Image (cartoon, rainbow, N blue to C red):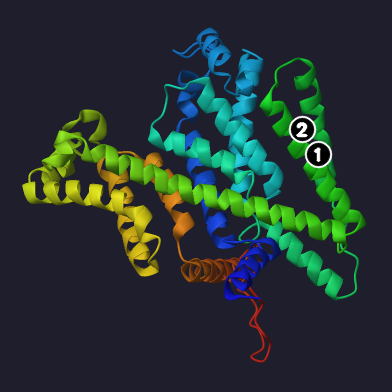
Amino acid sequence: MNRFTVRVSRGIARVTDAVLGPYQTAIVRIGFAATWLLFLLRELPHRQELYGPAGPWSWDLAQQLIANNHAFTVLMWSDSQVWFETVYALAMLSSALLLVGWRTRTMSVLFMVGVLSLQNRSVFMGDGGDNVIHLMAIYLVFTRCGQVWSLDERRARRAAAARARGEVPRPDRVGPVLWIVIALVLAPATGAGWIAGAWLAVFWGLWAVQGLWWYVGRRAPHGEPRILLDVVANLVHSAALLVIMAEACLIYSTAGWYKIQGSRWQDGTAVYYPLHIDYFSPWPALSDLLSAHGVIVLLVTYGTVAAQVAFPFTLFNRRVKNVLLAIMMTEHAVIAVVLGLPFFSLAMIAADAVFLPTPLLRRLGGWAARARGRLARSGARLPLPGPRGPRPPAEEPADQPQASPAV
């Protein structure tokens, strides 16, 4: 067996035997779920004007547009106010549950439904960050993004610990209930013709796969059918992860090459003009301060183009990639503050996070776990108020071990 064959065999084994980039997909999941949730919370008082049936882009206009572009949105199922409020609330709930990693397979689908339903209802609302969330919400459905930093991972760890002790883990009752509830929604929607074409195959296919996964896990958790399902899931996950990385590179490369063709980017003055638009100047004094220095405007203009064009090529060198990645994340943070585009910047930072190195993400996870442990211990030691005022906590013996941090 030659060296090329050995490398191919090792590559195939690596893709099929384990989940690639579990920390990267987890941080992408957390980033986009948090971005969309914060956006929905911020726009909660303005939700009627943005996506409601009485907004400027009326329900009839949206229905005419969707009849032509065949976009998916459950808000077209009814024009009632109750239905709109229900969809908006479910969009926030699915974002929060996906953020913490509760039933990520189901929540990723509901997250996608919420994003597509609201954005396709009023396509003229939002900015470039909405387009990124739109795409990533679809890609996340096909990833195994709950392997780490999730409630699913904690539940799986507890089940494994119970088997190691010779105990039988508690059966999963929440999963079948969710599966039945989703079927009760899909069946009438399909019968009414609200879901058709490719989306019909997608939703019923995902529903069937979820049921098959639960059945195999219940009947043969360590048999060949479960191994086969894991291999297929790992392959799909790896393909989706590759698409996410390619999408991020495509966004930067196309943006950079389009900027090169603009005369204002060529003469180094393009950054000056957005700083003097009222809509993009939440801090006028700061915008004036930055635009008053021609050298800074020139360097930022040329640096932005160079970074965006060069980013896909830096992936071949890990150190250069990490340096440029830090620069671009910093640039997005500056855009969030200076131009008043927080959700666009958060979406781009979440997309960039797929390229973060695993040791850094593990270190961040360790810091978060230690901070959570300290908060749990300090909360457990708070005195409880009694009828005669606060009672001081009892001192523990010196040789008694401290409680471990809550998971």
The image quadrant that residue 376 belongs to is bottom right
- Tell me the residue at 53%/21% (across/down): 121
Instruction: Identify the disc placed on residue 208.
Output: 1
Rounded to the nearest angstrom, the CA distance separating label 1 from label 2 is: 6 Å
Tell me: residue 9, above or below residue 202.
Answer: below
Kindly indicate whether the residue at mark 2 contacts the one at mark 1 (C-beta within 8 angstroms): yes
Q: Residues within 10 Å of mark 1 (few under 14, many from 20)?
A: few
Tell me: residue 276, above or below residue 229.
Answer: above
- Tell me the residue at 75%/62% (across/down): 156
* Badge 2 element: helix
Query: Is residue 62 left or right of 342 when viewed as pictured?
Result: right
The x, y position of residue 371, in whole percent, is 52, 68
- Tell me the residue at 91%/65% (across/down): 168
Tell me: residue 39, above or below residue 234.
Answer: above
Amino acid marked by disc 2: Trp
Observer-nearest of 248 and 94 = 248
The image quadrant that residue 80 belongs to is top right
Residue sticking out furthest to the front: 2
Amino acid marked by disc 1: Ala
Q: Which quadrant is the C terminus positioned in? A: bottom right
Residue matched to label 2: 204
The image quadrant that residue 224 belongs to is bottom right
Can residue 252 be seen here?
A: yes
